Image (cartoon, rainbow, N blue to C red):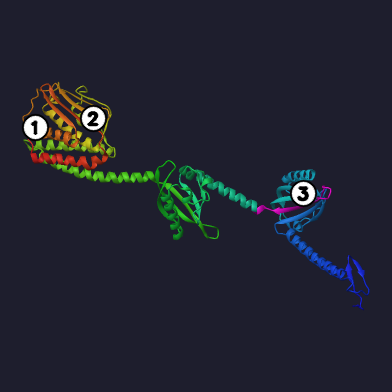
Amino acid sequence: MVVGAAVIVCLGGILVQGPWRLIALPAIGYLGFVLLRRAQQSEAALLRVEENYRELVDLPLQMTFVTDGDGRTLHVGKRWTEWTGLDLPATTAEWSEAIHPDDREKVGASWSHSMATGTNQDVEFRLRFRDGRYRRARGRAVPQRGASGTVVRWIGQIEDVHDQRAAEEQLRQTASLLEMIGRSTDSLIYAKDLDGRMLYGNRALEQLTGMRMADILGKTDSEWNSNPAEAEALQAVDQQVLAAGRTQDIEEVFTGADGVTRHYRSLKSPLKDRSGKVIGVVGVSTDITEAREAEEREALLTRELDHRAKNLLAVVQSVVALTRAGSLDEFKAAVEGRILALGRAHSMLAASRWEGADLLSLLNEELAPYGEGEPDRIHLHGPSLLLKPAAAQSIGLIAHELATNAVKYGSLSSPAGRLDVRWDIHAARGNSPRLRFAWVERGGPPVEERSRSGFGSRLIRSSVERQLGGTLTMDWNRDGLEVRFDIALDRSRHDEAEGESGKSVKTVARLVRQGAA
C-alpha cells in the first residue's frame, strides 16, 4: 500500500517527510507514537508537580527558600514579603533585618555551622512581622549534593510556629499546675476515658495502690486492680456517672497496697472536651475512713449511753427501794451518798467518752473528803489502771459502801484511825491479767462481825462475785476490817455493754427481793 500524502513523524526531534510504505516500517511509526504520548504525559506530570510545589511553598504558615551551595539566595517564597513587608532578601544582612536582634547571632552561628559541615539546619528565632510584632519561627534547611558529593544548593523552609509554641507552653503550664495540685493533696485525682481506661492519676493514687502511674495508664480498673469485686464496683459507679450526665456524690471503698480497706467520698463528673462532648469520667476521692469510724463510734456510744442510762435508772430505783434508815434525814443521806457515788463514776466515764475510768482517780474522788488536812490518814498505792465502764461503776459503789462503813463504824470514825488501800495486777502464766485489791483499816474502834449482813455488805459481795466474776473475802478483824477481792481485767466492751450492765440491775433487783437489814 502506497500513501500519496506526506507523512510526518517526530523521532527524537527529527522531522521526516516523504512517501513511505507503512508496511515497511510499522515499528518506527508505533515507536514515534509512544514517545509522543509519553512526552505529553511527562509534561502534564511536571505541570502537576509544579502546581503542587507552588501550593506547598505558599502554605499560610510557611515560606520556602533556595540558595546555592555557597548560601547565595536563588529563590524566596512570596510569603516573606507578606509576613515581613520587606523585599525578597538576597544577602545575609537582608535576611537578618527581620530577625530579632537577640536571635541574630544564634541564627548566624547555626547557618555557618551547617554550611561548614554540610549538615541540616534547624533553629528557632523571633521574626518581625509587618505590624512590628515578633512571632516565633522555625527555620530548617537541608543540603542537596551533586554527583561529586559536594553541596550544590540548600532547600529551606521558615515556618510560623508562634501559635503552636504558645499552645504548647499553655499545655505545659496546665500540666504543671495539674501536677502541682495532684502532689499537694492527699485526695485521689484521676480521669478515665469512656471505656474506663485510666488517662491521669496523681501521686496519692500511686501511693495508695503501690503502683507506678506508668503501669496504670491505659488500663481499666479490672486490668490493674487485684480485687475483682472492688474493680467491678468502681466501674459500675463510673457508668452510673456517665448515664446520669452530671456530678455524682458517691461513697466507695478501696483496699490499698497495705491491705487496709478505706472509705472514700467520691465526686465524679462526666469529662468533656472543648466542644462539650463527653469523653470520659473525672473524679476526686477523699479518704473519710476516720470520719466513718468516728461516726460508728458515736453511734455505738449513743447505744451504750442509752443502754447504761436505763440500767443506771434501774439501779438508782433499786438503791432507793433498798435503803433503810431510822429517820427521813438518815434515809436521804444514805440514798444521796449512793447516787452521788454512781454519778462520780459516770462523770469520769463520760469525760473519757466511755473508754474507762482511772482507779486512783475514782478512789480519790470517793475518799478525798475524809483525808482533808490529814495527808497521812489515807494511803493509796497501786499502778495506773484504766477500769472499763462496768468495773468502774461497780468499784465506785464498792468504795462508797466501804468508805461509808469506815466513817460510821471503822477506822475513819476515830482520829487515830488509818486506811490503807493497795492494788496490783497479776497473771499466772497463760492466764489473763487480774486486779488484786485490798482495803485494810487500822486504828479504829474494835470490830465485831454482824450476825446479819446489811445492804452494803451484800451489794459488795454481789458486785464482785456475780457482776465482775471475781472472788471476795471480808475479814472482820478486831484491829480493823480487811476486804480483799480479785477480778478479771480482760472483759470485752461487748460483754460490758450487753452483759455486765444487765448484771448490775439483776444484782440489785435480787437484793430488793431479799430485803435489806
Q: For the N terminus, give its image quadrant.
A: bottom right
Say which element carries label 2: strand
Say which element carries label 3: helix
Mark nearer the N terminus (3 vs 1):
3
Q: Residues within 10 Å of mark 2 (few under 14, many from 20)?
A: some
**506 or 179, which lies in front?**
506
Mark nearer the N terminus (1 vs 2):
2
Residue beneath label 1, please? 453
**491 or 274, which lies in front?**
491
Which of the labelled discs sits on residue 435, or is there none?
A: 2
* Position of residue 381 measured from the top left corner of the image (x, y, whole percent): 24, 25
**57 or 345, which lies in front?**
57
Q: Is residue 171 left or right of residue 190?
A: right
Give, as a three-letter code, the residue at label 2.
Leu
**Gap in angstroms between the C-alphas marked 2 and 3:** 96 Å
**Gap in angstroms between the C-alphas marked 1 and 2:** 25 Å
Residue beneath label 3, please? 96
* Position of residue 231 measured from the top left corner of the image (x, y, whole percent): 44, 51
Which of labels 3 and 1 is toward the front?
A: 1
* Position of residue 70 measured from the top left corner of the image (x, y, whole percent): 83, 48
Which residues make up the magenta segment? 144-163
Q: Is residue 46 left or right of residue 201?
A: right
Give, as a three-letter code, the residue at label 3.
Ser
Observer able to see residue 442: yes
